[in-house]
Amino acid sequence: MPHHHHTNPSHPPAARKLLSWRRVVTACAAVAALPLFLAAAPATEDPSRWRSYLLGSLPGGTRKETVAAAAVAGSFAGPAASTSSPAEAPLSSSGEINLSARIAPAAAPSMFLVPSSSPAENFDDGSMEEPEHPEIKTNPQKESAPFLKKEPISSGLPTMSSDANGEHVMDTKSVLPLTPEAPLWSTAADEELIYAKKEINNAPLTSDDPDLYAPLFRNVSIFKRSYELMERLLKVFIYHDGAKPIFHSPELKGIYASEGWFMRLMETNQNFVVRDPNRAHLFYLPYSSRQLEHNLYVPGSNTIEPLSIFVKNYIDLISSKYPYWNRTKGADHFFVACHDWGPYTTKLHDELRKNTIKALCNADLSEGIFIRGKDVSLPETFLRSPRRPLRDIGGRPAAQRTILAFFAGQMHGRVRPVLLKYWGDKDADMRIYSRLPHRITRKRNYVQHMKSSKYCMCPMGYEVNSPRIVEAIYYECVPVIIADNFVLPFDAALNWSAFSVVVPESDVPKLKEILLAIPESRYITLQSNVKRVQKHFLWHPNPVKYDIFHMILHSVWFSRVNQIR
């Protein structure tokens, strides 16, 4: 996606870059100072006067330089809400929880030194690519995250696990690594969450449900009972603060469509959304990580600091304007972000990073930001046509899939060049390309290749996530996932071993051997299960039961239930 940056031709290039950077910093600093302006204003003063003053203090600013101030300044429109907590609200006796106490993340590199991104590319052959941006991590990738081997503290809610024979059993280990801090005061919504947790603990065994195929789930009984309780109880409050385009402006096309579709369907939902925040179990922060990048990132600036400052100021705003964030220190709040930079924009606000439920496409355990059991791995869905999200769904029957393995895409990240080195143009069974040659696309394009292949390679790109995983499911091709430390989408609910193959990055040289070692009967089962699980990854303009919208919402709900004391 091209970035349009308007500059004064009278300035030389270096001066323009410096001027642009200074304006962005000025805009973010002005947003941070806005609550002070409002606090100092007389009670009878119209807050809009201060907004006009703030925005008027940036003459000659570009759209990107002004939107940072405008989007948050717009939050003050309308009557001010009471920020006082109930008089009877007891204070917590414990200090702020330290979520790194039992988790030793990798050394945190600077997230303020990142190169520019270039537009997403849609090849003529139908393939898609992530935006180009060189590796933003300065520390070398570790073979595995050292904290993954530590046992979590039990919170009493069983996980959705299965035993070696495929029988679904209740596991007494919690999926949440730490016991969260108690809220400052209790609400009726808390009591409903406690009730839901007890009900899920005692979930009746489920058998022969025509809508839920048990082998696809870690524990279908727990999932079904939790989903039923979500449908019956869950209430979500959406903050109306914030101006477009960063807030309330979903993007429904391309590789970031997941966050846009969720935002659109959540904000128009009448079953879960409530206007009274006192009834809410969850609070949705409706900003777009994609729009953050599009509107605040200055190409060539080599920093995402303006994005992080903007997010921090937004959280500071709602926590000073309303009492709900402070009640739980953000533990009952959530956001949905599919841009690669989504996790890193939380780094300047500790409570947002540690406590909030983060639904992220970039669900990388090695970064120390994504917390397994609390955060949600968001499926990355590439949609070409927002009006027809189900276009081209389906593929050839298993018996008609003549290609063993297929991949075509750009050679960015650490895995893809290795994949091409060992398998590019070296084996007729392994159709691995950096880009589909024209001589091949004349006979069979990208989508047709996926529909005709047994296994579709899904190597990580710049980050661990890839839209090819869901794309393979759409075209009924068994996904082969190559991305160490990646938490797979809906990991708390779905049994990915039933419909995919996960290959360690170090085993890329043995890829064909691994695939050929899978018995044909096992492949038939995997491919059949891909077709069965497909419905859980489909977007519908009007959501249907168990579709991707409800699966995302359920993952957030299950996380919150799992945290409640």
Image (cartoon, rainbow, N blue to C red):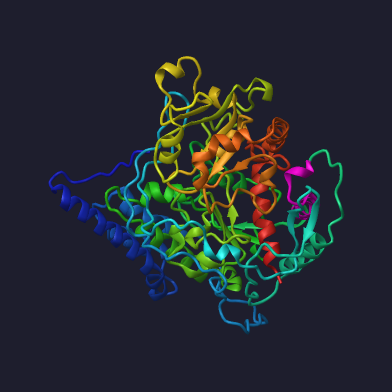
**Would you say residue 545 sits in the magenta stretch?**
no
Report which quarter residue 197 is drawn in: bottom right
Residue 98 pos. (x, y %): 55, 74
- Of 142 and 208, the residue lying toward us: 142
Quarter holding the N terminus is top left
- Image x and y of residue 217, in percent: 74, 47
Q: Answer above or below: position of 301 versus 154.
A: above
Residue farthest to the bottom?
93
- State left or right for residue 227 relative to residue 6: right
Is any part of residue 511 visible from this angle?
A: yes
Residue sitting at x 64%, y 44% = 549
Question: From what the image shows, is residue 438 above or below residue 194?
Answer: above
Front-most of residues 429 and 551: 429
Q: Residue at x 60, y 49 (%)?
A: 488
The image shows a total of numbered marks equal to 0
In the picture, measured across the screen, residue 250 lies left or right of residue 31, that is: right
Q: Is residue 77 visible?
A: no
Specify the quadrant of the image occupied by residue 53: bottom left
Query: Residue 131: x and y, percent?
Result: 40, 41
57 above or below 534?
below
Query: Residue at coordinates 51% horizontally, 55% vertically from top-left?
Result: 364
Is residue 218 magenta-colored? Answer: yes
Segment tinted magenta in the rendering? 212-230
Nearest to the observer: residue 220 or residue 145? 145
Q: Residue furthest top?
A: 443
Q: Position of residue 65 (x, y in %)?
A: 31, 53
**Left or right, residue 224 beside residue 527:** right
Quarter that holds the C terminus: bottom right
Magenta stretch prevailing secondary structure: helix
